[in-house]
Image: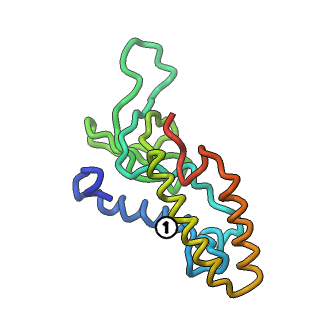
Amino acid sequence: MVFACGLPLSFWGDAAEYAAYILNRSPSKANAGRLSPLQMLTKKVPVLSDIVVFGSPCTVHQDAKNKSLGARGKQGVIIGKSDEVKGYRVYIPRDKVVVVTQHVKNVETLTKEQNDQLRRVHLKEIDEVACDGSTQKEKTQATVHDAMRRNHSKVGGWTRERM
């Protein structure tokens, strides 16, 4: 992840933490019903819409009450999600500081082609599980997933669409 986005190697810890964040919310073949580890613990489906590409450029808006003509935003790079508060951890290269904020705009997300590729891989894995078909429960879940596949919209996927 660090090499793909071109950040210095000093961000390897942030990349590992964000990778764990994503993996804990991703479906797993190891769990019954292909549930995510977080879903197994909390019994709630995790929200995947707030997952963005690690190292994606963004604009951080600061001090909206300031009415001066000065700049209200700073260019930054997303390096993860905050554990303490709802928001992204953003590295601002100009100030060489990491800030936690919800006020992030112009975030680069996965492209439509990348979302379609992830969806195809996910549906292929579902079909493989359905073909193996061990129990009635798994067959029922495969039927539900097949119905979802037929009725899915173009907007859905693992991440938000680019606006």
| Image location (x, y in percent) of residue 154 | 60, 45
Query: On the rendered structure, is 108 left or right of 38?
Result: left
Q: Which residue: 73% across, 78% down?
A: 139
| Image location (x, y in percent) of residue 8 | 22, 53
Query: On the rendered structure, is 77 left or right of 48?
Result: left
| Image location (x, y in percent) of residue 122 | 55, 65
Q: Nearer the viewer, residue 136 or 21?
A: 136
Q: Where is the N terminus found, in terms of image quarters?
A: bottom left
Q: Which residue: 45% across, 49% down?
A: 113
Quick one: SS at disc 1? helix
Q: Is residue 58 above or below residue 114?
A: above
Question: So how many labels did they put on this image?
Answer: 1
Q: Nearer the viewer, residue 20 or 138?
A: 138
The residue tagged 1 is 23
Render colour scheme:
rainbow
Label 1 Cα neighbours within 10 Å, binned few <14 / some 14-19 / many ≥20:
some
Q: Is residue 19 above or below residue 111?
A: below
Give the residue type that dot 1 points to.
Leu
Q: Is residue 100 above or below residue 65?
A: below
Q: Which residue: 51% across, 53% down?
A: 116
Q: Which residue: 61% across, 79% down?
A: 31
Q: Nearer the viewer, residue 107 or 124?
A: 124
